[in-house]
Image: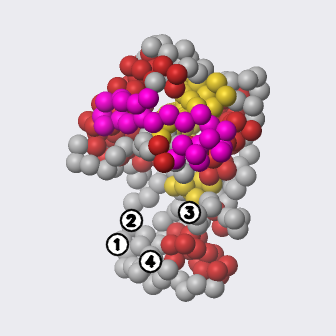
Amino acid sequence: MREQRVTICGCGWLGLPLGKFLADKGCIVKGSTTSEEKFRLLQEAGIQPFRVSLDPSFTGDDPESLMESDILVLNVPPARRPDIVEYHQEQIASLIRVVKASPVTNVVFISSTSVYPSLNREVTEEDAVNPEALSGQALLAVEKMLFEERSFRTTVLRFCGLMGYDRNPVNFLGRMTSLGNANQPANLIHRDDCIGVIYEVIRQEVWGEIFNACSPGHPSRREYYERAAERSGKPMPPLAEEERNPAFKIIDSSRLERMLDYRFRVPDPLDLPEE
């Protein structure tokens, strides 16, 4: 891959290791954080740090230098608040104004499969209509905003539930008083695959697309936590009483696998590596 200048807006659980991965691949990486206390962590990962706040207006240190990049990875989830849909649109609209005044030509937007309602079947990228969750409504509105912009091209990645490293089911077993929706299929993706997918979009220069990103294996929630209990020796929490025929969805990522020729590092959540 040719040397790319990449700015990551949101260097948390996913953004920080993504930045390190891209820096190790030879990219020039800049990253935003809301706290100067994280500057050292970013610098150690090879990321030039900038303090940024979106509340909802963009404020921060030297926005021109932060956005002096070819690619922006936008990893800012909606904040949990009563006006989540409107507030998130205001946040991203403020950020778009900064991006439009920069050399950025391509954006990777980290969205979520919360844009899909529970349709009791497999869902593809075309099924994002009338999200039930407010977070899904916010993300879908922002996706539309980004695609309407003509000064840059956007590819949207809809990640499902994140797993790996400290987000291991073993860590949740001791805190669970009961397991609800035990028979629902799990939609999960390992952090290494999140990074791998983002990297392939950048490397292959695949822009103007929407991709679901979810491991192809969909064990039930019960199977997922039972495997964790077996591996750790921790007790399995009791199953909560379930409603009859609870709604579900199964995220189909075959378009991603086909168009990017991508092979998941953790294709089955039951085979989650010990890290």
Q: Name the residue under label 4.
A: 176
Residue denoted by label 2 = 246
Q: Earlier in the sequence, mark 2 or mark 4?
A: 4
Kindly identify the amino acid type of the residue bearing the numbered disc 4.
Met
For the residues labelled 4 and 1, the Cα–Cα distance comes to 19 Å
Amino acid residing under circle 3: Arg
Quarter of the figure with residue 270: bottom right
In the rendered structure, which disc, 3 or 1, sits on the residue that comes first in sequence? 3
Q: Is residue 51 found inside the magenta-colored segment of the image?
A: yes
Q: Where residue 137 sits in the image (x, y, percent)? A: 33, 41
Label 1 and label 2: CA atoms lie apart by 6 Å
- Is the residue 131 above or below the residue 60 in the image? below
Q: Which of 159 and 7 is in front in this view?
A: 7
Label 3 to label 1, Cα distance in Å? 27 Å
If you read the primary sequence from the N terminus, does the residue marked by circle 4 or circle 3 appear first? 3
Q: Mark 1 points at which residue?
A: 243
Q: What element carries label 3?
A: loop
The foreground one among 200 and 133 is 200
Instruction: Tell me which amino acid carries mark 1.
Output: Glu
Mark 4 crowd level (few <14, some 14–19, many ≥20, 10 Å Cα): few
Q: Which residue shows up at 61% across the image and 75% down it? A: 228
Q: Do the residues labelled 4 and 1 touch (CB within 8 Å)?
A: no
User: Would residue 119 be visible to someone looking at this image?
Assistant: yes
Q: Residue at x 69, y 55 (%)?
A: 267
CB under 8 Å between callouts 1 and 2? Answer: yes
Q: Give the range drawn in magenta.
A: 38-61
Q: Do the residues labelled 4 and 3 touch (CB within 8 Å)?
A: no
Distance (Cα) linking label 4 and label 3: 14 Å
Residue receiving disc 3: 167
Mark 2 to mark 4 CA distance (whole Å): 20 Å
Closer to viewer: mark 2 or mark 4: 4
